Amino acid sequence: MPRSTPRIPGPGTPVYVISVAAELTGLHPQTLRQYDRAGLVSPGRTGGGGRRYSLNDLEALRVVAELTAAGIGLEGVRRIIELEHQVAALRSRNAELLVRARELQAALDQTAAALAERRPNLPAIRPPSGAIHPFG
């Protein structure tokens, strides 16, 4: 029977036990537990309740560690992360709205061009000779 190709876990797949996550991030396992309790990272859980960290979790832990090393408290870190997520969501929404605005502008331009083709050519109205033009 041919051997199947091993599946490589994606960045969101929780695969690292707490000791490995601690080693990869340079943090103490108790610090990882503290960050979990504070809601700064949400590792996956095994059937027995053990924590499993993904690559995304490891990156989040690095960000938390950088912010706390800069002197920011855990509540401040939580708020910063929350705001960064809001900014990312707003940027995404802004990009969607820009695409929609371009689509609407193109439709408006197309409609204006179609109306211009249907409009009969009217003669230009000239002021009577000798009259003073209001615009100079």
Image (cartoon, rainbow, N blue to C red):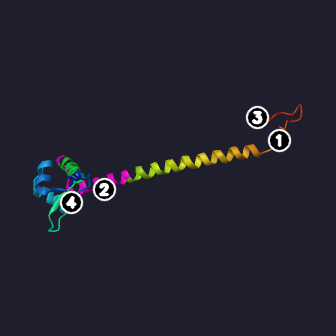
Nearer to the camera, 131 or 78: 78
What percent of the width, then of the height, locates residue 40? 23, 58
In three-dimensional space, the C-alpha distance between marks 3 and 4, rounded to whole angstroms, equals 73 Å
User: Do the residues bearing badges 4 and 1 touch, measured as CB atoms within 8 Å?
Assistant: no
Residues at circles 2 and 3 in contact by the CB criterion of under 8 Å: no
Measured as percent of width and height from the top left, residue 73 is found at 20, 54
Do the residues bearing badges 1 and 3 touch, measured as CB atoms within 8 Å? no
First in sequence, mark 2 or 4: give its number: 4
Numbered badge on residue 43? 4
- How many angstroms separate mark 1 from mark 3 (CA)? 22 Å
The residue that mark 2 highlights is 82
Residue 22 place in picture, x, y as percent: 12, 52
Secondary structure, magenta segment, majority class: helix
Segment colored magenta:
69-88
Q: Amino acid at mark 1?
A: Leu
Q: Residue furthest bottom?
A: 48
Element at label 2: helix
According to the picture, the residue beneath numbered tag 1 turns out to be: 122
Q: CA distance from mark 4 to mark 1?
A: 72 Å
Q: Which quarter of the rendered picture does the C terminus lie within?
A: top right
Label disc, if present, on residue 135 of the rendered structure: 3
First in sequence: mark 3 vs mark 4:
4
What amino acid is found at the position of numbered circle 2 in the picture? Answer: Glu
Between discs 1 and 3, the one toward the N terminus: 1
